[in-house]
Amino acid sequence: MSDVNEPVKQMTEDECWERLESTSFARLATAAMGDVQITPVNYVVRDRQLVLRTAEGGKLASLVVQSRVAVEIDEIDGDHAWSVIGKGDAHMVHHADEADALDDLGLHPWVDTRKEVFVTIDLDEVTGREFVLSR
């Protein structure tokens, strides 16, 4: 953090993207049919776009009904913490050529399950804050 006396610091958009690119785990928030879900996902960043893999099921069904999503990443390290939240639209990849290109990114499920559907998320809002903790 730039000023240790400042308990909360807003991050720039570039700083937020640096954090998004530095990790591969996020929480994905979806809302559809009167229900809200928060799901842990692993992802990669490609050209300021998040890419994840999923399987048939609730998460994918939610994205089909309502493409607007939010993602959140964070870290706590001693007496400092940060959080980045992004909002945008998720899209299933339908074209084989694009899926093949995304497959080359090396994004694999953390759990030994079949996740053959690629989803891209175009974030139109990215905000973040750094905190000095008082615990």
Image: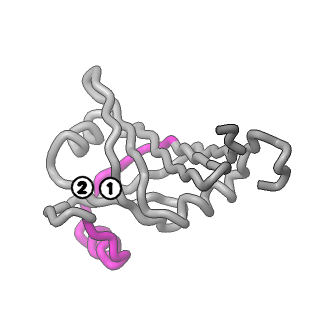
Report the magenta residues as a range.
87-109
Q: Earlier in the sequence, mark 1 or mark 2?
A: 2
Residue at position x 34%, y 76% in the image = 106
Residue 82 position, x and y percent, is 62, 49
- Which residue of the protein is positioned furthest toward the bottom in this rendering? 104
Q: Say above or below: 16 vs 62.
A: below
- Specify whether residue 106 is painted magenta: yes
Task: State yes or no: discs 1 and 2 in contact (Cβ < 8 Å).
Answer: yes
The foreground one among 131 and 63 is 131
Residue identified by numbered label 2:
54
In which quadrant of the rendered view does residue 52 lie? bottom left
The amino acid marked with disc number 1 is Val
C-alpha span from label 1 to label 2:
7 Å
Tell me residue 92's x, y (percent): 29, 53
Q: Position of residue 34 (x, y in %)?
A: 28, 20
Position of 81 with respect to 35 (left or right) is right
Task: Give neighbour class at mark 2: few <14, some 14-19, many 20+ (Cα, 10 Å).
Answer: some
In front: label 1 or label 2 = 2
Which coloring applies here?
one colour
Is residue 131 shown left or right of residue 57? right
> 77 or 109: nearer the eye?
77
The residue tagged 1 is 119
Q: Quadrant of the N terminus?
A: bottom right
Q: Secondary structure at mark 2?
A: strand
